[in-house]
Amino acid sequence: MKKNKGNIIQFPKLRERLLERGIEALQAKQYREALRFFYEADDIEPNDPEVELSIVVCLFELGELEEAKQRCQLMLQDGRGDDIQLLQIYLSILIHLQQYEQVEETVQAALQKRALPSSVREHFTRLLHLSQKMSEHPLPFSDNEDIRLLTESENAADHMKVIEQLENEDITPILPVLTQYLTDESYNPITKTMILRLLTLKQVRDTVTIKKFGDTMTVIPAMLDESIETHFAADVLQLLEHHLASENPSLYEIAAHIWLRYVYILYPFSPTQTSCKQWAAAVHTVACQFQGVSIPIEEIAQLYHVSLEDIKPLCKKLYEIEEISYLK
């Protein structure tokens, strides 16, 4: 053991253990717990850029935006940490705070003084244009309230109402908020699908990134083509209709609902690339269990000419989606 700062006794590698536990908590989205560990590590050895950045991320996720903003400003002034990464986080905080004039000033300074990768420069230029438009034509107060609801409420049903209202609005000023929403894995995948379809409806031609279920995809909403997913979904429905529609219409309706909901929530990602028969058998199985229909899974597999090993993992995926498919 060694002494540090008066009579405070530090155990060997205490800081390393604190950082490990902080990172584990951060990855588990336990932001309050992670913040505690990072604060303790910072007390032992202040001004470590990685620790300070981790603290900012935790504060941001916890909604403590003003403190996160102040810490970012100090780090930028002192030149600590990854300049571009820190700048992007700082801009995200300003956007969440709706401080668009500061966004404009910060981006202009970055474009004039810094050597930026072309992709970052393009993104900042687009952000500058949007911030200028927002500063010149701010949203009405009621719209600002809606945006706060979208970014601060934990109720997905509230988010859905706001997104539906945006269908009849000019969404250009709030594109940064909407695109950030798509990358935040804490938000409901249903509302992410709604936002992505909203961007497609509005013919947004900027590149956006969407994260769902641990996967990441970059798309241009205006160029999205749902035809492949639609054809595949229709083929599965056709198989379900063939086996269920006449014999048990109510079971067919449930099966169709389960399948279409699964495809919708997954969008723009596609179902696991297996055969239509395997997916139809899995949906049939899950529908029977939801409906209380007693039929051996082996019999369903035989009906579609597939194996149990083929459909069990697909059933698991369907159950996982069902658990999060109801807005809270």
Image: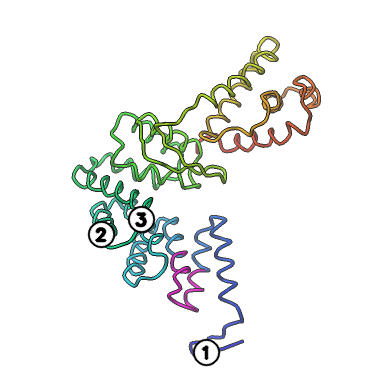
- What type is the residue that disc 3 sits on? Ile
Find out whether the residues at labels 1 and 3 contact each other: C-beta distance under 8 Å. no
Task: Decide: is 115 above or below 192.
Answer: below
Disc 3: which residue: 93
Picture disc at residue 105 = none
**Mark 1, secondary structure of its residue:** loop
**Mark 2, secondary structure of its residue:** helix
For the residue carrying disc 2, how many other residues have a C-alpha within 10 Å: few (<14), some (14-19), or many (20+)?
few
Distance, label 2 to label 1, CA atoms, is 49 Å
**Stretch in magenta:** 38-54
Residue 49 painted magenta = yes
> In this orientation, which residue lies closer to the viewer: 203 or 91?
203
- What type is the residue that disc 1 sits on? Asn
Disc 1: which residue: 7
Disc 2: which residue: 112
Task: Give the mark, 1 or 3, whose residue is nearer the N terminus.
Answer: 1
Find out whether the residues at labels 3 and 2 contact each other: C-beta distance under 8 Å. no
Residue 190 painted magenta = no
| Count of marks placed on residues | 3
**Percent position (x, y) of residue 143?**
28, 39
**Percent position (x, y) of residue 291?**
68, 23
